[in-house]
Image (spheres, helix red, strand yellow):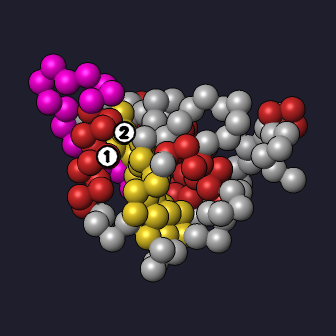
């Protein structure tokens, strides 16, 4: 996970007036697909893990560059709990997926608001900290996911 911060980008795409969150997510994915025309759009379930309900918003593959791009869109401010935590999860899933593990994995958090929550700012500080961070997951949650 040390390389994760280098491969996380964030961008801001404002929501349209009266737009629903699901419509915002679909529109963001179309915009991102337009911005990365050399990337093939994959079914977002390609990265889904059985029994894990969270599903990413967009998944793009550039075979020539051997690059996988994961997109998560939130019609909110940048936040850790809403969006960033999911991006971290999807990044880890891709790094451990037999089809994607040898690719360069990039992630992009797209938000409707350009501001960040306090929780997001704290997470950003943790990323630049010199202290080694470890994430511990109960083994019952990792059956069939990691060896």
Q: Magenta span has 54? A: no
Q: Residues within 10 Å of mark 1 (few under 14, many from 20)?
A: many
Disc 2: which residue = 73
Pinpoint residue 60: horizontal percent, then vertical percent: 43, 58
Residue at the front extreme, as displayed: 43
Residue 55 screen position, x and y as percent? 53, 36
Residue 54, picture quadrant = top right
Q: How far across and down, in percent of the image, does residue 12 sit?
A: 25, 45
Nearest the eye: 140 or 8 = 140
Which of disc 1 and disc 2 is earlier in sequence? 1
Question: Which residue bears the numbered disc 1?
Answer: 29
Residue plotted at (30% across, 64% down): 36
- Residue shown at the point (31%, 25%) measured from the top left: 21
As drawn, 88 above or below 38: above
Q: CA distance from mark 2 to mark 1?
A: 8 Å
Q: Quadrant of residue 13?
A: top left
Where residue 92 sits: x, y (%)? 65, 51
Q: Is residue 128 above or below residue 21?
A: below
Rendered residue at 62%/63% (across/down): 100
Seen in the image, is 112 located left or right of residue 61? left
Residue range corresponding to the magenta coloring: 8-23
The magenta stretch spans residue 15: yes
């Amino acid at each position: 996970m040390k390389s994760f911060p280098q491969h996380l980008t964030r961008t801001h795409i404002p929501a349209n007036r009266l737009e629903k969150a699901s419509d915002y997510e679909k529109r963001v994915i179309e915009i991102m697909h337009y911005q990365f025309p050399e990337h093939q759009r994959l079914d977002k379930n390609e990265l889904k893990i059985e029994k894990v309900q969270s599903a990413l918003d967009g998944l793009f593959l550039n075979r020539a560059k051997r690059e996988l791009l994961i997109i998560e869109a939130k019609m909110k401010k940048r936040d850790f709990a809403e969006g960033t935590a999911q991006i971290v999860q999807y990044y880890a899933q891709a790094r451990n997926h037999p089809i994607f593990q040898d690719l360069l994995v990039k992630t992009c958090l797209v938000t409707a608001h350009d501001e960040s929550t306090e929780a997001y700012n704290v997470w950003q500080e943790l990323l630049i900290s010199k202290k080694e961070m470890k994430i511990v997951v109960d083994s019952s949650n990792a059956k069939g996911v990691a060896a």
